[in-house]
Every structure is written in C-alpha cells, then in structure tokens.
Image (tube, grey):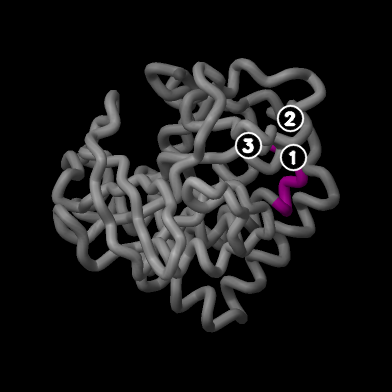
Amino acid sequence: MSADASSRPITLTRALECLRDGTLRLEGLLPDGSNYTFLGLVKHKGVTLPAVYKPIKGERPLWDFPENTLAYREVAAYLVSQSLGWDLVPPTVYRPEGPHGPGSLQFFVDAVPDWHYFNITDQERPAFQRVAAFDIVINNADRKAGHVLKGHDGRFWLIDHGVCFNAQHKLRTVIWDFAGQELSEEVSADLQDFAGRLEDDDTLRGALESLLDPLELIALRRRCERLVKAGAFPHPRSNYSYPWPPV
C-alpha cells in the first residue's frame, strides 16, 4: 500500500485513519457499476490515498437484500477478512458523511489492466483456496472474475462485497476450482478460530453487530462451523451458483 506521489508505503493504521477522517475529493464516476461508485482522493495529515466511495444514496434497491445496507456489507467483508488474518479486502471504512452522504470508502487498488480471475496460473491457483472459503463464509452472491484484482506487486485483492452476508443461501461465484477438495489445515484452523471469536470477542462481535442484522451474524458463524465440519469445499448446487456475467 502506498501513499501519494512519493509512493511511500504507509501502515494499515494510518491508511484507515486517512480513510475515516480525511478530506474526500471526488474525481469522477467509475464505469460499469450497477450502483453509483466514485473514484476520489482522500487526504489526512500528509497522507493522500486514492479511494472508492460508494454512497448509500446511490445504491440500487434489490429484492433480496434490505435497502440501504450495501455499504455496511462492504465494511463487514473487510472486517471478516482481517479477523481471519487473510488480508484479502482492501482497507474499507464506513463514512457517516461524504459528498453524496454516508457510504463506504475503500482504498483503491492500482491493478494490472485487463487481469481477472480467469487469468490465474496453475502456480497461483492454490492461494485461492482462502478466497473460495471466504466467499462461502460471507455468502457472496456475486463473485465475478473481475472482482478479483492483481496489484502490480503481484498481490491479489477482492472487491465488491455489497451483496454478501444474507442469512439465506445466496452463494454465486466463478471460483469452483476446489469443489470436493479438502480444506487445508491452515484454512480450517483460521475458520475455526474465527467462529470462536464471533462468540467470545466482544469487540469483533460489536463491530459486526453495527453492520449486519442479528440473523445474518448468526448465519455467518454457522457457515464457518459447517464448512469446518464438512472439511471440504461444496459443489455448486445449480446454474444459480454462477454469477452473470461471469466477468
């Protein structure tokens, strides 16, 4: 993660502080989004970060998700990724104010152009077991190939988590490479630890309770426990299990 023109690396703590408290200036709309999504620059105490701003006001109503909740789900996905220790989602915060009202603000990843999940190599594929498990746990209803980014440093990032955490099964993803395969010991241990922390860690639980419905939080823990108990990745249930378009 880098700062402004100097490209000096900054700590996660400073990045989150900048996103939460910085002054946000919008540069323009990002194309191809189903909701209003803006690219901006946020400045705070000498740090300037590119950021993606998704105001609640710009969310398109969906029949299967409560209105005005997508920004909260974006933040919840970041918290789950961090709590698992997987660092898959760029730093993301909820801003109670912004140029178009409250919404989520996420660090903008300078990604390799025209790269997406279908471009991964056989050498890179094993790293995506965590991604597949993450999407199962958060019940991602829209993991398109283009929602996986590759930074110029080779690091992979996951974006667009507004339609996750539904209490009902909604999993739609292009990442079915691991169907039927056993979870690695590391992934299983991380999931088990996270499920326990959802019970015992008041700070984590309180943060997620501020973002998700109580039933969604219960379902989150149960998905973790079920996946660990199964010990293997599920198979797609039907054609509904794939997003459209896939990229």
> Mark 3 sits on what residue?
156
Q: Where's residue 18, x and y in %?
A: 42, 64
- Please give the range of residues in magenta: 228-233
Q: Residue visible at 69% across and 43% down?
A: 130
Which is more N-terminal, label 1 or label 2? 2
Q: Residue visible at 23% across and 34% down?
A: 29
Cα gap from disc 2 to disc 1, whole angstroms: 6 Å
Q: Are marks 2 and 1 in contact (CB under 8 Å)?
A: yes
The answer, for residue 213, to whether it is visible in the render is no
Cα gap from disc 3 to disc 1, whole angstroms: 23 Å
Q: Residue visible at 63% across and 16% down?
A: 119
How would you rate the neighbour count of disc 3 (Cα within 10 Å): few for under 14, some for 14-19, many for 20 or more?
A: many
Q: Which mark is residue 232?
A: 1
> Is residue 139 found inside the magenta-colored segment of the image?
no
How would you rate the neighbour count of disc 2 (Cα within 10 Å): few for under 14, some for 14-19, many for 20 or more?
A: few
Q: Where's residue 148, x and y in %?
A: 54, 31
Question: Label 2 sits on what residue type?
Answer: Gly
Would residue 34 be found to the left or right of residue 192 on screen? Answer: left
